[in-house]
Image: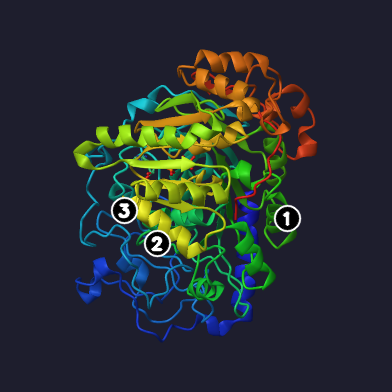
Amino acid sequence: MTTSWADSVANSASETVVSDKNSLRRPTRSTYVPPHLRSRPASDTPILSGPAPERISFNGTAGGSWSSMGGSGSGSGSGGTKPELGRHNQGYGYAGARRGGGAGGWNNRSGGWNRREREVNPFGDNDETDVTDQAFSEQENSGIKFDAYEDIPVETSGENVPPPVNTFAEIDLGELLNQNIRRCKYVKPTPVQRHAIPIILGGRDLMACAQTGSGKTAAFCFPIISGIMREQYVQRPRVARMIYPLALILSPTRELSCQIHEEAKKFSYQTGVKVVVAYGGAPINQQLRELERGVDILVATPGRLVDLLERARVSLQMIRYLALDEADRMLDMGFEPQIRKIVEQMDMPDHGMRQTMLFSATFPREIQRLASDFLSKYIFLAVGRVGSSTDLIVQRVEFVQESDKRSHLMDLLHAQRENGTHGKQTLTLVFVETKKGADSLEHWLCINGFPATTIHGDRTQQERELALRSFKSGKTPILVATDVAARGLDIPHVAHVVNFDLPNDIDDYVHRIGRTGRAGKTGLATAFFNESNLSLARSLAELMQEASQEVPVWLTRYASRASYGGSKNRRYGGGRFGGRDFRREGSLGRNLDHYGGGGVNSGSVYGVPGNYGGYAPGVASAWD
Ligand SMILES: Nc1ncnc2c1ncn2[C@@H]1O[C@H](COP(=O)(O)OP(=O)(O)OP(=O)(O)O)[C@@H](O)[C@H]1O
């Protein structure tokens, strides 16, 4: 798979070299010198043009130092793959290796940062802060209870599963990326990172299911960034005004795409890998201008991406990595046609020619089956019980009639205010069913002395972003939201999630409560339940039981009377949460070849196997 893609890149590279000799000319614009090298003597400063360096092993064993690679700036050498120096997009990726050596093979690539630009430091610290020599183990990472993850059950299936790692140090991600990991104060990989990173670095497709807040974003970002850093001088076609990203990360909401973009920018700082985001509700021309300045990793919502593709401004021809975050949502009825269009009907390399990774905390079996269309000989990874919530979240369910919900919420908020530390109120996220309901509850909270704001699909993007900022900063410590805020958002200090209106689908519940209890921290989730939620009773009771939560007797009674309700939250296979790799299960797994998922010969279980099942897809109304 990797070879075929490499071949296609090599072919397109050689074609380009032949067809556009001018592109190999030495650039005439001034050379960008990254901030950390600016104070160095001229002789130590690498020059961007010059002979193409030989390919260097991942360990940087061949080629050696920058001075030996950078040359003297005396124009292009002969032979070898040449950097793209033309005027079209992609910029000029570059980052100098810092002291410590061994990073020679990682950074001298084209495609990312335009050399005229200065990369903004996303950490907001001093560029000169030297993180090179810090050991991962020496840093502090307050508040992260890693022990919470130690005995988490992990299950993998698929052929030749690469073994997991225990530390970042033992993964060859590249020194510059390692430095950024240290800047993020990630001491050691979370379980999903331990398993997923070696799998992706090993060139394998992956379907990964891991609990909310367990670090899935880094699990797919690190190997993508690292992989792009390794691909030196990937040559992209030259078509006027066409943009050729190497990696595509799709997510269902604008806010989540922005968040992934922010995270990926931190991880890729000074690596030369450029990350750009495109999402609906914001001016497309501005995003296009940003894309034209160069992009390696495009983070996008499906709708805006389709728009860019239809305008023939973005080509997916060079996509090497495709990641779907919240993959089950991306493949449910709301998004599937758009995803199919993007992945199957445009110019993206076929599966097997690209690497595809799907991540979510929930993976209904039906969706797994659909998803396997996009994957090739993939590995299935389940960290924790598939579709379960994390034990870090204390879950409470209270029986509250519709008419009493507001006063009940008020009681909770008053109690919370009294218990708040240092007079500061912790952040509370309140989920409601409808956009109107969100506006009305927000208004009511405000007039009752609880500063609140709201986020839902009827608000302008500007209003949505403002609301999120105001919530994060604590200015309005209550955010009333529809499901648009249910998935992926990583907001520190959300101590309480209230399901004012319960969702119809248990997976939505799992994602909603997952906005608290993240990265090893504890959280509280309260749900208001009444007769209108009967269809959720059984799956809710089972979910709570699985997460060792106290299930109220009245809920158990409702659950024993109820079926699994409507198709949206029906668990296949009866009472037990049947879940894991659908390929390993009888009826659905029979026609593996038909589903294109490839065989599944082996599986290993680290701990207790996950046991959740799937259910039919739901309609996504509140999503971008
Ligand atoms: N190795 C690590 N060490 C410490 N913190 C980490 C590590 N990896 C990720 N984090 C932090 O954990 C938090 C949750 O990560 P992330 O948002 O990727 O979770 P997720 O699994 O994608 O959650 P969700 O299912 O809700 O989307 C983030 O604040 C992130 O910075």
For the residues carrying marks 2 and 3, which lies nearer the camera in this image? 3
> In front: 275, or 568?
568
Which colour style is shown?
rainbow
Dot 2 or dot 1: first in sequence order is 2
Residue behind label 3 places its C-beta within 8 angstroms of ligand 1: no
Amino acid, disc 1: Glu
Q: CA distance from mark 2 to mark 3?
A: 41 Å
Amino acid, disc 3: Lys
The quarter of the displayed image where residue 148 is located: top left
> In front: 536, or 369?
536
Along the horizontal axis of the image, is 574 left or right of 240? Answer: right
- Residue at position x 56%, y 20% in the image: 541
Q: CA distance from mark 2 to mark 1?
A: 32 Å
- Residue at position x 50%, y 30% in the image: 528
- Give the residue pinned by disc 3: 475
Label 2: element kind: loop
The residue carrying pointer 2 sits among few (fewer than 14), some (14 to 19) or many (20 or more) residues within 10 Å by Cα, namely: many
Quadrant position of the C terminus in the picture: bottom right
Residue 573 % position (x, y): 71, 20
- Give the residue pinned by disc 1: 344
Dot 3 or dot 1: first in sequence order is 1
- Give the residue pinned by disc 2: 107
Residue 93 % position (x, y): 43, 68
Label 3: element kind: loop
Figure quarter occupied by ligand 1: top left
The quarter of the displayed image where residue 412 is located: top left
For the residues carrying marks 2 and 1, which lies nearer the camera in this image? 1
From where the camera sits, is residue 612 visible? no
> In front: 318, or 162?
318
Amino acid, disc 2: Asn
Residue 26 % position (x, y): 44, 83
Label 1: element kind: helix
